[in-house]
């Protein structure tokens, strides 16, 4: 018997026509270690199970999500680029749209999903922000692409929600990750990277602090979320760092024509 899927809705103030949620691992048909609601086709799960899970997801959405081929990069998929390419999945780590009922989606299992909505509800975005994409500018590129869809839109008119990612007590990194963020202020780096006692060159990193600082620097002030940890919350979330072989959950956003 397939149990009902459980989802997490963002705690943010956006127009009613903005619809968004993050799936969890609860529900679906995937077997261990992908149990149960795995939505990632490239995780090693039975493709038939994944497609059945995606069909369950589609049943509560206005359209098929625009799945991305995520490569830990900074490319943003736009309505124009999708029209040029034609059929997905689209190779990108973020997507934007101003088309009603077009569902944006990113898959994660420790990396940070970030959802965006303009305050008038006309433009939305979704980004897959692991440390590589975050340090490389995927959030900045997403905001730029959103503003490109509306001549009157500025970053100050955009709200952001930081979804479930590996938390600051679990994300162990090396000097290479610290160096990747060297362009941010020393104050932020000292808050975001805590040296691990007895392990020279090793740190606990806080993706939420790093992302919030970058969003603030763009002029975005309404930033919500950031209070999850995929690594420690095994009941709800997949975690690659924790399990290595595991599924992926989705963060999705769309603008509904029916409020």
Image (spheres, rainbow, N blue to C red):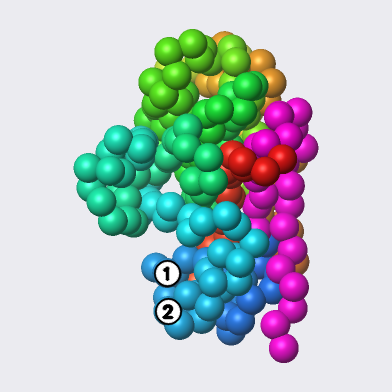
Above or below residue 221? Residue 88 is: below
First reached walking from the N terminus: tag 1 or tag 2:
1
Q: On the picture, is 35 further left or further right than 12?
A: left
Helix, strand or loop at disc 1? Answer: loop
Most extreme residue toward the left is: 84
Q: On the picture, is 175 further left or further right than 13?
A: left
Magenta span: helix, strand or loop, mainly? loop
Quarter of the image for residue 205 reads top right
Numbered badge on residue 210: none
Q: Residue at x 67, y 49 (%)?
A: 21
Question: x and y percent of residue 237 in the render?
Answer: 66, 61
Most extreme residue toward the front is: 258
Residue 19 drawn in magenta: yes
Q: Residue at x 49, y 46 (%)?
A: 102
Q: Residue at x 57, y 43 (%)?
A: 254
Region of the chain picked out in magenta, as a range: 1-23
Numbered badge on residue 41: 1
């Amino acid at each position: 018997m397939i149990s009902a899927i459980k989802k997490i809705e963002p705690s943010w103030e956006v127009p009613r026509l903005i619809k968004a949620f993050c799936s969890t691992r609860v529900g679906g048909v995937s077997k261990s270690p992908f149990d149960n609601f795995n939505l990632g086709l490239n995780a090693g799960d039975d493709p038939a199970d994944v497609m059945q899970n995606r069909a369950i997801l589609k049943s509560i959405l206005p359209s098929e999500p625009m799945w991305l081929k995520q490569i830990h990069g900074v490319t943003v998929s736009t309505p124009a680029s999708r029209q040029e390419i034609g059929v997905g999945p689209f190779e990108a780590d973020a997507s934007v749209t101003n088309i009603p009922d077009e569902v944006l989606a990113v898959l994660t299992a420790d990396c940070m999903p970030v959802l965006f909505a303009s305050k008038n509800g006309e433009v939305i975005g979704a980004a897959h922000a692991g440390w590589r994409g975050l340090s490389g500018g995927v959030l900045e590129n997403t905001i730029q692409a959103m503003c490109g869809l509306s001549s009157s839109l500025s970053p100050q008119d955009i709200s952001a929600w930081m979804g479930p990612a590996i938390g600051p007590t679990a994300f162990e990194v090396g000097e290479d990750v610290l160096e990747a963020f060297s362009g941010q202020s020393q104050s932020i780096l000292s808050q975001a990277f805590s040296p691990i006692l007895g392990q020279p060159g090793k740190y606990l990193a806080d993706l939420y602090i790093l992302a919030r600082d970058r969003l603030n620097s763009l002029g975005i002030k309404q930033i919500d979320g950031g209070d999850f940890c995929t690594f420690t919350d095994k009941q709800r979330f997949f975690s690659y760092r924790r399990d290595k072989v595991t599924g992926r959950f989705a963060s999705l956003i769309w603008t509904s024509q029916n409020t």
